Structure formats: C-alpha cells, structure tokens
C-alpha cells in the first residue's frame, strides 16, 4: 500500500487546553498525555490522544518521534508590526518620540515592494523560529507592504491576520494616505486577501493621533461594510499620547470615545495596550466586547505603564496578549509571558503558568473567535503545532533537574525560554523551522 504524503503522526508529550484554568488544581481545563500522538492529514488534525490509541488508527503513517519534548498548539501573537523588524531595540525614547524618531523613518522604506518582500521573508522566518504560527500584524501605510505580508503568508500556508495602517496626519510625507485612498486601498486589500487561503484582514486605523476625524469615519464605514474583518488600533498607551488625543478630539468623552464615535467598536476589535483607562472606557469595553491587548515587553521598553489584567478580567473583559515588536523587545511569546508575569507581580497579581500557556494558545484564539481553527490540538483544528524543549539551554536543563510537575516545566519554559526552546514548529502540518537561523544571520551580518 502506498503512503499518503499528507499524513503524518507526531509522537511526544502533549498539552492542549479546553478552557482557561481557574487555578493550579483545575485539571479539567486541559488534556495532558505523557506518551501522546497527533495524527495529521491534509494540514488538519484528524486525531489526538494517547499514542497507542491514535497509532492504532494510523498503521501506515510515518511517525516523527519528538519525545521527550512537549507538543502544544502553535503560539498566537495578537499585535505585532511587520515593518518594524529593523526598529526593534531602538534606544532611549518613550512612545511619541520613538514613533517620530525611529519608527516612521523606518516605515517609509516600505514604499519599495522589493524591500517589503525581503522583510516579509525575515518576518515569517522569525515568527516560525519562535513558535508563533498566527499573528495579527500592522503593515505600513503602503499597500505594497500588505501585499508582501499576505503573499508571503500564503506561500507558507500560515494563518495570518493583517492590514495596512490608515494614517493621514501627524506623520512624515510618504507615510500618509487620505481618508479616500485609505478607504479604497483597504477595500481592495480586503477583496483580494480576506479569506484567501488562511489570510484574514484587519481594518487598521493606526491610532487617533495619526487619523483625522474624516479618516476614522471612513474606517467606521469599512467596519460596517465588512463585519467579517477584524479591526485593530492602539489605545491609552502613554500619558502624552492621551493628552494629545484629547487636544485633537475635544468633543470626544475620552480616548476610547474617539473610536466609539467613529463606529469602530465591535467584538472583533483589538485595542493594543489599553493601559490608562477611565471607568467609562472600561464600561464601554465590557459592553462592546472590544478586546484589550496586553503588550508586556513593549510597555516596559517604552516605559508606558502597567496593564491591569485582573481589573479588566474582573469586569468580564477578554484580554489578549502580544509582543508588539518593534516596541516589544522579543518575538518570543515565551519571553512575553515572562515579562507579563513581572508586570502582574508589580501589581500584586498572579499569572499561573497553566493560565499563561492557555493565554498564548487557546486564550488568544478565543479573543480572535478562532478557537475552532487554531489554539488547540482538538481533532478538526488546523495542524499548527510547536515542539518545546524545556532543557534547551544549560540554565534550563539545570533548573529542570529540580522540576517536579508540568506546571514547573511550563514556568521554566516561560521564564528562561525563547526561540532556543522551540525544537520544531509545524505550520498546516508541515515542519517550518527548517531555515537555519545561524546561516541567515551570518549572511545578514556579512551584507550589513
Ligand atoms: N501607537 C501608534 N503606533 C504605534 C506603534 O507602532 N507602536 C506602538 N507601541 N504604539 C503605537
Ligand atoms: Zn503596536
């Protein structure tokens, strides 16, 4: 009998969540198989469970044995900037100076389609290397950047969400659209890419400061015309940003009110940062189902402030979590959890490792309304899988010698792990960590 090349059986320790764990003892929230298997067919998970049970249904299927590593759903990053791969690690500024001094300068280079295509290859290499299989990305103002983003994601069969930023003021020449061109270009990109393969579109007015009232109205019209799309922007990240927004929109009740008046708030809206919120804004988030996105490494790097996870959750709000590269300082969702833990510690809040790993997998999928497609290893899910090695470095291996539980292993992964702890990643069932980062890095340095 010939083998079906689209079928593959992965063996290893397996962890997947069914719900957010309420506490450390909540074993009903997840499945853990010490000797488990995942049967993949045509990019989809067909079966998952104890190895003996799954292998019995897959007699002729080739087995990739990842034991003793841990297989989990691929990580989901709900806020990242594709044109900032060469902005990350820029010194010495808080939000508005950082945008004007570094970020806008760099994003003007994305007018060139060749630059966009080259950067898209690096961007997706980096995401894959860090175990991130889905991201929600801001492209630059140029349609060429969104074209490159979606084309490269499609080439790799990755489930990616993105959109060109709409920005028509308070930015340099070459980085501004107009209300009409921002609307038209976004509309054309939606028609071309939303639902094309695994691509999905996010309508993306960058933030209140870089959009006129007219542009936000046009973005609101797009949201009404395309309820199938996501919406993303930034909210209340920094005190100077909030004060400037109040000056620009004197008739709005507050920062969130600017977006609310433009008709942008829906459960498919992602609001990056959402740090310094008023009671009215929190009430509006609860009512509308719009989702705050916690960006820990970015909030520390830019000195923006401490995200009140427990306060928002206590109001029934679903928080997503993300890197926000290039203000964020790591592509790794593991490192992101490490900094999230510390930000919550500073506020007397706790982040248990089981909840943490739920957050970067199923939790972010729930925030995106995609938990039937990604974020778990249930049969029927798309086969995006990360293989984790908690002994990847000397420091991790030493600490692992003293670990006695799954929760401890997870905490070591999130506290000490990064791309080195990602042994393999599968995208739609195919191994995707094949690029040798060392080779690419040497070539880049030689060219620089
Ligand atoms: N606010 C508006 N644009 C940006 C951006 O690119 N990064 C961050 N961190 N905040 C923003
Ligand atoms: Zn951002």
Image (cartoon, helix red, strand yellow):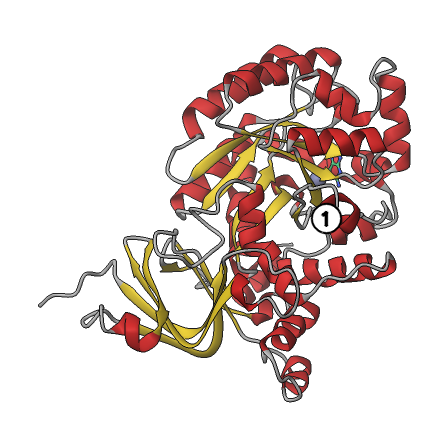
Q: Which residue is mark 1?
A: 295
Q: Nearer the viewer, residue 193 or 259?
A: 259
Residue 436 visible in image: no
- Residue at figure coordinates x 82%, y 28% from the top left: 280
Q: Position of residue 114 (x, y in %)?
A: 52, 37
Q: Give neighbour class at mark 1: few <14, some 14-19, many 20+ (Cα, 10 Å).
A: many
Residue 386 visible in image: yes
Q: Does 217 sit above or below residue 45?
A: above
Q: Is residue 239 left or right of residue 231?
A: right
Q: Secondary structure at mark 1?
A: loop
Q: Quadrant of ligand 2?
A: top right
- Residue at figure coordinates x 62%, y 17% from the top left: 220
Identify the image quadrant of residue 251.
top right
Q: Position of residue 230 (x, y in %)?
A: 55, 31
Q: Is mark 1 within 8 Å of ligand 2?
A: yes
Quadrant of image for the C terminus: bottom right
């Amino acid at each position: 009998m010939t083998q079906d090349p689209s079928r593959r059986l992965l063996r290893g320790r397996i962890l997947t969540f069914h719900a957010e764990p309420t506490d450390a003892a909540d074993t009903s929230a997840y499945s853990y198989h010490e000797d488990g298997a995942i049967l993949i067919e045509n990019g989809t998970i067909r079966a998952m469970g104890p190895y003996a049970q799954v292998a019995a249904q897959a007699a002729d299927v080739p087995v990739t044995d990842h034991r003793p590593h841990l297989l989990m759903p691929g990580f989901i990053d709900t806020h990242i900037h594709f044109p900032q791969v060469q902005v990350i690690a820029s010194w010495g500024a808080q939000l508005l100076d950082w945008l004007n001094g570094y970020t806008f300068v760099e994003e003007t280079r994305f007018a060139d389609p060749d630059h966009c295509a080259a950067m898209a290859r690096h961007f997706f290499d980096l995401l894959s290397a860090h175990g991130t299989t889905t991201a929600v990305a801001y492209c630059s103002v140029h349609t060429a950047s969104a074209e490159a983003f979606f084309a490269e994601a499609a080439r790799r069969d990755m489930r990616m969400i993105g959109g060109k930023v709409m920005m028509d003021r308070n930015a340099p020449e070459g980085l501004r659209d107009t209300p009409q061109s921002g609307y038209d270009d976004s509309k054309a990109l939606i028609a071309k890419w939303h639902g094309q393969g695994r691509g999905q579109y996010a309508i993306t007015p960058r933030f209140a400061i870089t959009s006129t009232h007219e542009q936000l109205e046009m973005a609101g019209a797009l949201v009404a015309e395309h309820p199938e799309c996501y919406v993303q922007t930034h909210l209340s990240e920094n005190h100077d940003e909030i004060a400037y927004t109040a000056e620009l929109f004197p008739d709005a009740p507050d920062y969130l009110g600017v977006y609310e008046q433009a008709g942008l708030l829906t459960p498919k809206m992602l609001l990056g940062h959402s740090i310094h919120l008023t009671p009215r804004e929190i009430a509006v988030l609860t009512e509308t189902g719009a989702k705050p996105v916690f960006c820990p490494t970015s909030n520390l790097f830019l000195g923006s402030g401490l995200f009140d996870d427990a306060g928002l959750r206590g109001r029934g709000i679903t928080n997503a979590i993300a890197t926000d590269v290039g203000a964020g300082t790591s592509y790794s969702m593991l490192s992101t959890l490490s900094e999230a833990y510390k930000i919550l510690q500073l506020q007397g809040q706790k982040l248990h490792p089981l909840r943490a790993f739920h957050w970067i997998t199923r939790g972010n999928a729930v925030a995106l309304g995609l938990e039937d497609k990604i974020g778990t290893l249930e049969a029927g899910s798309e086969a995006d899988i990360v293989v984790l090695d908690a002994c990847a470095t000397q420091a991790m291996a030493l600490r692992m010698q003293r670990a006695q539980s799954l929760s401890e292993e997870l905490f070591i992964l999130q506290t000490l792990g990064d791309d080195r702890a990602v042994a393999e990643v599968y995208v739609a069932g195919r191994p995707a960590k094949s690029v040798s980062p060392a080779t690419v890095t040497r070539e880049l340095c030689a060219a620089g």
